Image (spheres, rainbow, N blue to C red):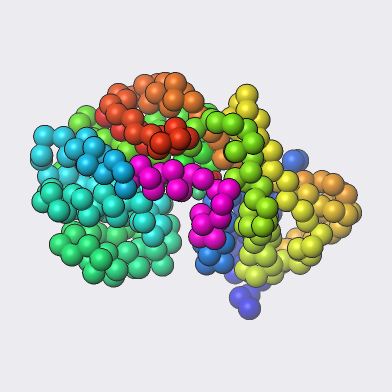
Amino acid sequence: MPQPSVISDTQFYKDVVKGLSGTPKRLDSKYFYDAQGDKIFQELMNCEEYYPTNCELEIFTQKTAELARSIIADGDAFDLIELGAGDATKSSHLLKYLIDEKADFTYLPIDISENVISYLNITLPVTLPGIKITGLQGEYFNMLKKAAAISDKRKVVMFLGSNIGNMQVKDAEAFCKVLRDHLSPGDMVLIGIDLKKNPHTVLAAYNDKRGITKRFNLNLLERINRELNGSFSIPQFDHYATYDPESGACRSYLVSLQEQQVNINGQLVSFAKNEYIYMEISQKFTVEQVNSMAKSTGFKPLHQFFDSKGWFVDAIWLA
Ligand code: AVJ
């Protein structure tokens, strides 16, 4: 068990205490992804109701040539950067195609997880012989700066999986602006975004029957118990998901089933009965919103690739 003083110095602890001291209470969904959370997210991606991964995988397997053609552009050497690469399942289809086409590129996966980066550095040269790979572990924009410092080639930045949906629309726009500021004219973005669709379909994906999403959310409380010396009683919290078809905001909450107090490394947090913690937003967009977000942040929308159901888009923007 780490020393209490060490725990309270961590950013994780500070963010948790701050988030649970405000009204409404909230936690940052970026903390879902410890080793346990990564595992539950894998389960989620394989569950029936969670469609985004399958939709985007369909695009990457069925439209590989078209995707490749749009990012190869005029055949110059380029850096293919992936923000939040994870296990690179989707992108590896594109990578394989590019290698087979003898495209001149280096793959630079960026991930906050050291695990992810060392895994990719070791496995990809085996599964994709001939790949040039430089994994970068750290925050997206710090690592983008680093990528620019080690190479002056044209950049293609992939941001897949509708990870942008974890930001409110305003924050997503701000993120795209900062991304644009890190790029030069001629650089590109390949961004995967989940679209508005039948509200039942969206809600079911975040409220699956087997309760995997519930476990995914509760795992953050368990993580606080494990890493921050917390005392959450997990059965005393329930998961609640909503989708508002008008705004496109899908939100997850954990609801306290009774009045209770939780101790997090000496810091007491009180919950009223039915008080909620706002856990995550998974924003859905229209195609028009995607295009206007590109334009308002300094990009030119170039191409769009859809799955056969039209539920998900991978868009290519030019800086
Ligand atoms: C990985 C952020 C795209 O919001 O759809 C899945 C995470 N949350 N089920 C999403 C998630 C609940 C996922 N992203």
Classify the position of the C terminus by image quarter: top left
Q: Is residue 16 left or right of residue 291?
A: right
Q: x and y percent of residue 22 in the render?
A: 73, 43
Q: x and y percent of residue 100 in the render?
A: 15, 53
Question: Residue visible at 20% across and 50% down?
Answer: 97
Residue farthest to the front? 308
Q: x and y percent of residue 26 in the render?
A: 68, 46
Classify the position of the N terminus by image quarter: bottom right
Q: Is residue 114 left or right of residue 278?
A: left
Q: Is residue 224 left or right of residue 165?
A: right
Question: Residue visible at 29% across and 68% down?
Answer: 123
Q: Give the magenta part as a residue range.
A: 41-60
Q: Is residue 50 magenta?
A: yes
Front residue of this view, candidates 251 and 42: 42
Q: Is residue 119 magenta?
A: no
Front residue of this view, candidates 48 and 56: 48
Question: Residue visible at 62% across and 68% down?
Answer: 227
Choose top left, top right, bottom left or bottom right for residue 197.
top right
Q: Is residue 241 above or below residue 169?
A: below
Q: Is residue 5 above or below residue 183?
A: below
Q: Is residue 140 left or right of residue 282?
A: left
- Residue 100 shows in the view: yes
Q: Is residue 104 above or below residue 308?
A: below
